[in-house]
Amino acid sequence: MTDSNSDRLKIISGRSNMELGKDIADAIGVSLCMREASNFSDGEIFVQIQENVRGADVFVVQSISTPGNDNLMELLIMIDALRRASAKRITVVLPYFGYARQDRKVQSRTPITAKLVADLITASGADRVLTMDLHAGQIQGFFSLPVDHLYALPILTEHIRKQTYDNLVVFSPDAGGVERARAYAKALGSDLGIIDKRREAKNVAQVMHIIGPVKDREVMIVDDMVDTAGTLTEGVTALMNAGANSVSACCSHAVLSGPALERIAASPLKELICTNTIESSPERRAIEKITHLSVAKLLGEAILRINQESSVSSLFEYDN
């Protein structure tokens, strides 16, 4: 006898980005799965799933964003609760994969924390992972689970095309981001440039050389994330000093920690275009230079295709 629950689709959201979780559920026409998530007085996290999920295809939406440790632990607890509630399949939807920058050993006696996080998600009982714009593509290989890796490129380039840019050139903020910047330049039909920098310490960068056409051009800096905005604002200043008419930037993940908001507000940056993979604070929304775009429809479409066992490859082609 066929289990009538076997094909049920459930979306459950952690507390890291409830707005995005609700938008994803709305985009695919379902209600968020009810759950209780709270903290005991000593900080321990408690989660209870408040709906029947036996035999269901469950998608857990949670960004490992600030506070990263709490949100990661909450994700692991939700996965364990769903596994013990007999969910048929558990897909972890990670709009933002925290710890992704610790993807290799750059000094002696340091961890590869991105691999550790992947192992924790696997050990907790997840069956597959859906994520967006990983800091390094090879992180997909850190999982022993199927990983679907989406890109925000179509969403960001669609917005850029709607703006009035005269003689646009796309710049990578460093040599490591050239592949990403090249994909954006190809999608936008623009020239490509590189900011050559030397990192002096954590979250501190010094711009060295500008490679590419800048004078009398409108520049778009492309990166996967903006954290303290030190690299970004240094690059903006260098490009303006090199004769750019204006400098804008776009990124998938607006971490914007520490002095980031003050740096962006004080810089000559024209606009920072970002997505809502990380929940936006009221302070962030108050800065007119920052534009937020939603990835809910893209993630929702991927969720539907995974649930229906259909192809999602067209959604994560880098230069689509």
Image: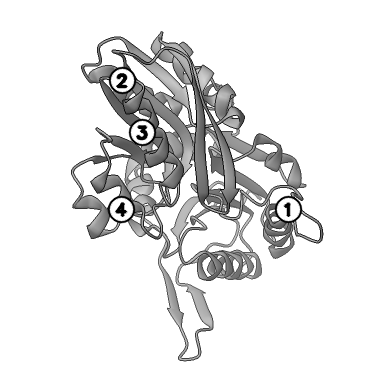
Which is more N-terminal, label 1 or label 3?
Answer: 1
Disc nearest the viewer among 1 and 2:
2
The answer to which of marks 2 and 4 sits earlier in the sequence is: 2
Q: Residue at x 55, y 34 (%)?
A: 197
Which residue has dot 3 on it?
A: 236
**Nearer the observer, disc 2 or disc 4?**
2
Closest to the observer: 28 or 19? 19
Which mark is on residue 115?
1
Mark 3 and mark 1: span between their CA atoms? 33 Å
- In contact (CB < 8 Å): disc 3 and disc 1: no
Question: In which image quadrant can residue 134 be found?
Answer: top right
> Which residue has dot 4 on it?
261
Mark 2 to mark 3 CA distance (whole Å):
9 Å
Specify which label sits upstream in the sequence, 3 or 4.
Answer: 3
Mark 1 residue type: Lys
* Secondary structure beneath label 3: helix
SS of the residue under disc 4:
helix
